Image (spheres, rainbow, N blue to C red):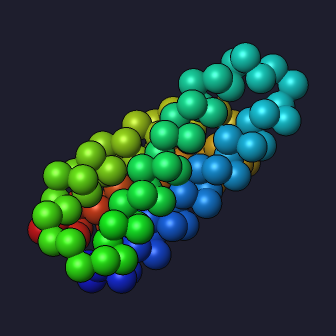
Amino acid sequence: MKRKELMIKLQECANACFHCADACLQEENVSHMRDCIQTDQVCGTICLSTSKILAGSFEDVNDLIKYCAKICGSCAEECGNHAHDHCQACAKACQECREACLSYLN
């Protein structure tokens, strides 16, 4: 996995997370979606931040990418617990991003 390819996956994941969080706010039982919204926000933020850092030439990024993979895994799990289409799409994007992060590290 090349740096630019990972940046694209990170941005796609961030977009899916922010979309999911917004869509969760429109659900009838928003309080039931609290953990999903919170996890989406954290995951989207870390993915976006990681992508921005990778856009530069800074090389000491492995720990950040490991953390990003961890958060993406957590978000994929949380969103996967909900049947909503936006949650399922987010879970898929997060899992793909997690795999991309791990692939980059190997």
- In the image, 40: left or right of 63? right
- For the C terminus, which image quadrant? bottom left
User: What residue do we see at 52% from left, 35% from top?
Assistant: 39
- In the image, 62: left or right of 27? left
**Residue 14, x across and y down, in percent:** 54, 57
68 lies above or below 2: above
Look at the image and tell me whether residue 75 can be seen: yes
- In the image, 97: left or right of 90? left
Look at the image and tell me whether residue 97 can be seen: no
**Residue 92, x across and y down, in percent:** 52, 55
User: What residue do we see at 42% from left, 58% from top?
Assistant: 49
**Residue 76, x across and y down, in percent:** 47, 43
User: What residue do we see at 70% from left, 18% from top?
Assistant: 32
52 lies above or below 68: below
- For the N terminus, which image quadrant? bottom left
User: What residue do we see at 77% from left, 43% from top?
Assistant: 23
- In the image, 66: left or right of 25? left
**Residue 61, x across and y down, in percent:** 19, 62
> For residue 55, what is the image quadrant?
bottom left
Image label count = 0
